[in-house]
Image: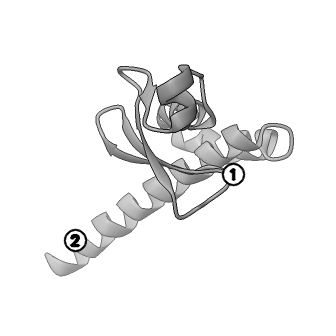
Amino acid sequence: MVTATRTGHQLYTVTSATDPEKVYTVNMELKSCSCPHHKYRGAYCKHLEAGHWAEKAREIKDDDLGTLYFKYETKEPAIAAAILTEIERRQSILEAQTELLRIFA
Ligand SMILES: [Zn+2]
């Protein structure tokens, strides 16, 4: 399973499927990936797919994230992984906001 972490506008750091220590840079605007599979063969790789689903997951409404995660959990693991990452991203934003409110209360 690959995990896409957003690092900028349409930019992602995506883990390798075979070596979780290895990461590739995906630019969704240019549809490019730094992995050899894409770089030398121009392939639509797993990392680009992960970036695609990460971008799509950002458009999902809060209330629909859980339902969609369970819908794709078993049949489309790449989509489910993107949704889970998005759930965690929104959760960490909420936690940061709560912490800021606590500090400045
Ligand atoms: Zn790639």
Q: Which mark is residue 1?
A: 1
Residue 69 placement: quadrant: top right
Residue ID at (59%, 23%): 44
Depth check: give the residue in front, 102 or 22: 22
Between marks 1 and 2, how big is the CA–CA gap? Answer: 34 Å
Q: Residue furthest front?
A: 40
Q: Residue furthest right?
A: 75
The amino acid sitting under disc 1 is: Met
Q: Residue furthest left?
A: 104
Local SS, label 2: helix
Q: Quadrant of ligand 1?
A: top right
User: Of label 1 and label 2, which has the lower sequence position?
Assistant: 1
Local SS, label 1: loop
Tell me the mark number nearer the camera, choosing from 1 and 2. 1
In screen coordinates, is 76 left or right of 57? right
Residue 49 placement: quadrant: top right
Depth check: give the residue in front, 86 or 95: 86
> What is the basis of the colouring in this image?
one colour
- Could you tell me residue 12's position as x and y percent? 40, 42
Residue ID at (65%, 48%): 81
Residue ID at (28%, 75%): 99
Q: How many marks?
A: 2
Depth check: give the residue in front, 91 or 46: 46
The amino acid sitting under disc 2 is: Leu
Residue ID at (65%, 50%): 17
Q: Which mark is residue 93?
A: none
Crowd around label 2: few <14 · some 14–19 · many ≥20 (10 Å) = few
- 39 is higher (above) or lower (below) than 94: above
In screen coordinates, is 104 left or right of 59? left
User: Where's the C terminus, which quadrant?
Assistant: bottom left
User: Mark 1 CB in 8 Å range of ligand 1?
Assistant: no
* Residue linked to disc 2: 100
